[in-house]
Amino acid sequence: MTGATTPGLASAAGGSTYRATLASGSRAGVYWPTLEPTDRWIRVRLGDALIADTRRAQLLIDYGPGVLPTYLVPVDDVRTACLADREVATDGTVTWSVRAGGRTARRGAYASSSWQPGHISFRWDTLEWYEEDERVVAHARDPHKRVDVVRSSRHVRVEIAGVGVADSHRPTLLFETMLPVRFYLPRDDVRTDLLIPSDHTSTCPYKGVASYWSVHANGTAAPDVVWNYREPIPENPRIRDLFCFFNERVDLKVDGRRLERPWTPWS
């Protein structure tokens, strides 16, 4: 699950803190940050205007609060005439606005002083990225990450403030590298009368665009605690219209055993 983050523009300290926490806990063996070549044809657009076009991109893999994988594009493969309003932050990060076709993406391009010289990246929320001829959303896909979706007969019960909000013997389990197991439950096994639709959405390149609901139970408000994918990407059809609760924010029992609440960026 990917929220509204901007790869590369968050502080390096934030990413380092998250990496250190994982390495000291159950997620040891963290391999990032890494910089890898990619054979993918990468293009970046602002509306109909082509801003970057490269077959020489580098894939920067890193994670943390506001830090997600992105591509570094050689400056020679960027329409630099579209870059304006150069700014330099105290940490050495350089940003530019991107202007083309009558549109402006403020601080839409950026370069870190820690990167290889002569490379630029772009925001994922204000510009469109393409791998070959397919659009990629939210952030670059990590070739070291795997997402497996498996049907199960485990007994899953979700409680909030002591109130049962879901109970199922037919969950679909989603296993995603370095994240907690997520339990996707059929609509009929969820107390939908306790769900309050939210305006919040999030985008994940591995799953699609998620819609959210809040829960009010026993006088307790749990905002944006459950989500589903009405139209997941073609690679993950099995989670379509199933409900999933944040393990980090609810009391989750699996086969009668209460699971500890994990620490993640969504805690």
Image (spheres, rainbow, N blue to C red):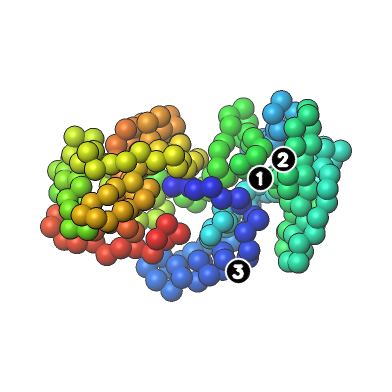
| Amino acid type for the residue under numbered disc 1 | Arg
| Amino acid type for the residue under numbered disc 2 | Ala
Q: Secondary structure at mark 2?
A: strand
Left or right: where 8 falls relative to 253: right
> Which of the 4 quarters of the picture holds residue 233?
top left
Nearer to us: label 1 or label 2: 2
Residue 70 image point, x, y percent: 62, 48
At label 3, counting other C-alpha atoms closer than 10 Å, the crowd grade (few under 14, some 14-19, many 20 or more) is few
In this view of the protein, which residue sits in the foreground, 201 or 135?
A: 201
Q: Which residue is mark 1?
A: 123
As measured in the structure, the alpha-carbon distance from the residue carrying label 3 to the one carrying label 1 is 20 Å
Which residue is found at the position 45% from the left and 42% from the top? 200
Left or right: where 31 falls relative to 112: left
Residue 53 image point, x, y percent: 74, 35
Of callouts 2 and 3, the N-terminal one: 3
Mark linked to residue 149: none
Of callouts 3 and 1, the N-terminal one: 3
Residue 134 image point, x, y percent: 58, 29
Extreme bottom residue here? 24
Visible residue check, residue 160: no
Are the residues tagged 1 and 2 within 8 Å (C-beta)? yes
As measured in the structure, the alpha-carbon distance from the residue carrying label 1 to the one carrying label 2 is 9 Å
| Amino acid type for the residue under numbered disc 3 | Ala
Q: Secondary structure at mark 3?
A: helix
Are the residues tagged 3 and 1 within 8 Å (C-beta)? no
Residue 205 image point, x, y percent: 50, 40
Mark linked to residue 105: 2
As measured in the structure, the alpha-carbon distance from the residue carrying label 2 to the one carrying label 3 is 26 Å
Q: Which residue is mark 3?
A: 13
